[in-house]
Amino acid sequence: MHHVAVSILNYNSSRSTIACVQSLLSAQHAAEGGYLLDVFIADNNSATEDQDRLRQALADIPNVHIQINTRNQGFAAGHNGNLRVIFLRAIPDFVWVLNNDCLVYAESLPALLKCSSQHPEVGIWGATVLESDGETLQCAGGCFYNSWISTYRQYGHGQALASIDQLESVEFDYIAGASLFFPAAVLYKGLCSPVSAPSVKSGLDQHWLNQSFFLYFEELDLARRLKQGFSMAWCKGALIRHAGGSSTGTDGGRRNRLAEYHSTLSALKYTRMYHPGRLWCMAPARYLLKCLQYIVKGDFRLLWPLTRAYRDFVCALRRQ
């Protein structure tokens, strides 16, 4: 019987986290013991009220494990800490890095396990990620990235779930970060060491996700670090609903300042790591396009975090 460990982060969004965990437990119950499941939650130093709500709802469930971080470590470092706990306390066959604002369908995990058994060469599996309406595709497995101007496209975005069979499996640039499903062996030996950005030290605690990124671009970095012999693929039958935002700092479809700052800073770091010759094009193109976008929308509040990200990136380069 396969043992699956799920890594989830919580940051002041315990209601979403509780709903996500409950969907996982309900799916396990529906599978009637078809797999073993352990859910590991790392709280990134949420408010006391949010932590208390999380504990009250989930702490007494035997296969749910909660740890509280003393600071907000971000996506990469938060999951890395969780993965260390997972591998210290369990020997899973698979690890599912899942956003806390996802709701898992009953057939999702059995579908992922079946896909993984049939295709052992796949190192990262993507899911069929749906919008909150449950009828519209947000992303069919993965995305495509334009490194010249730092834009991305989600495969199948906006199409009806009913049309999913018309979509073919394709080669992605990366798997959508809301749902990253790994054979445990890939996390043990299938990733190259991460490249560090300016001002970020390398170390053993960066073995899995690259802690150069606080939010965003971790999944792109993972795709670049998959060792030869491993690939990425989409498991059509793995359905999840993704509200979006509670894990990355957007609210009701409206990006906040923290999200804008880190998405831009991460884009600059990623380009310098993997496409340094394109930084001269990407950096001004992203800035001008973003400024134009926010001016047209009248969303002037995001111009400062956008500019601050560029300033901090340049300062880090100078310190190096």
Image: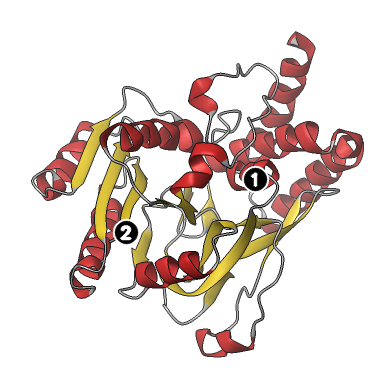
Please state which of residues 120 and 103 is positioned toward the viewer in this rendering.
120
Q: In which quarter of the view is residue 132 placed?
A: bottom left
What is the count of numbered marks? 2
Q: Is residue 76 or residue 138 the one in the foreground?
A: 76
In the rendered image, which quarter is residue 194 located in? Answer: top right
- Quarter of the figure that contains the N terminus: bottom left
Residue 38, relative to residue 20: is it above or below?
Answer: above
Q: Amino acid at mark 1?
A: Leu
Q: Is residue 303 visible?
A: no
Q: Position of residue 121 (x, y in %)?
A: 60, 59
| Residue with the mark numbered 2 | 2
- Residue ID for mark 1: 226
Q: Identify whether 238 is placed above or below 289.
A: below
Alpha carbons under labels 2 and 1: distance apart? 23 Å
Whether residue 53 is visible, yes or no, is: yes
Percent of width and height locating residue 40: 28, 43
**First reached walking from the N terminus: tag 2 or tag 1:** 2
Left-right relation of 193 to 78: right
Near mark 2 (Cα within 10 A), the count class, few <14, some 14-19 or many ≥20, is few
In this view, the residue in front, 317 or 192, is 192
Element type at mark 2: loop
Residue drawn at (60%, 36%) of the image: 262
